[in-house]
Image: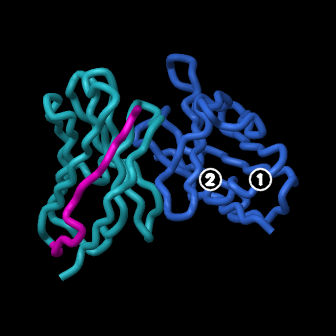
Amino acid sequence: QVQLKETGPGLVQPTQTLSITCTVSGFSLTSYYMQWVRQTPGKGLEWMGFIRSGGSTEYNSEFKSRLSISRDTSKNQVFLKMNSLKTEDTGVYYCARGAIMDAWGQGASVTVSS
Amino acid sequence: DVVMTQTPVSLSLAIGQPASISCKSSQSLVHSDGKTYLSWILQRPGQSPKRLIYLVSKLDSGVPDRFSGSGSETEFTLKISRVEAEDLGVYYCWQATHFPLTFGSGTKLEIK
């Protein structure tokens, strides 16, 4: 059974760094792209980037300067790190499987506030 | 960036009525490999998105056949032949042909 679960800090202060982990089961990270998508009140659904099955990454230029996606295949985990957070980054962050996102996690709610 | 424009913004339909949602892209979604990477997802209230249709018209496993997708190039349509109560939520189209991947702004389906 394919499962994806995001875990994150919940609350982050402005200018700080956001770290979210996506833990997967039921498939191998070496066989699938893994994507990050966020949903914010201001912009709706936004694609952030992905890590390919081979480990290379692609980012939305909107976030490129402050976003990093990595993984630990031995732990079945994918990581999102984004620095210089602003209040507009408040939203729900999803990981999704595959180049055309056939399965999504439940999402990690993030509030950026002091 | 490719802009995905969905209409209508909202729909209010009774059980059993048909539904139709339009999605138009600002550029052709035909990839150089010949495929069209247009998908539809449904986000039910309080839930994460769930993919319904990919490559314009292919239904995901477990998706009822009352759902169908069609279109080409820049114009696409999601149809529900007879709306059921479980179909309420927000429907989004999105494209994976061009970087960055982009989403429509959504169509909210309410049940009368």
Residue at 12%, 68% in the rendered image: A16
Q: Where is residue B107 drawn, in percent x and y?
A: 65, 59
Front position in the image: A73 or A66: A73
| Amino acid of disc 1 | Glu
Q: Where is residue B85 drawn, in percent x and y?
A: 74, 58
Mark 1 neighbour density, 10 Å: few (under 14) some (14–19) many (20 or more): some
Would residue B13 appear left or right of A5 to someone viewing this image? Answer: right
As drawn, the residue found furthest toward the right would be: B17
Residue annotated with mark 1: B84
Number of marks in the image?
2
Specify the label residue B91 is tagged with. Answer: 2
Disc 2 and disc 1 in contact, CB within 8 angstroms: no
**Would you say residue A85 is visible in this rendering?**
yes
Colour given to chain B in the rendered image: blue
As drawn, the residue found furthest toward the front would be: A1
Residue at 79%, 49% in the rendered image: B20
Q: Which chain is cyan?
A: A
Disc 1 chain ID: B
Q: Which residues are magenta?
A: A1-14
Mark 2 neighbour density, 10 Å: few (under 14) some (14–19) many (20 or more): many
Residue at 46%, 33% in the rendered image: A100
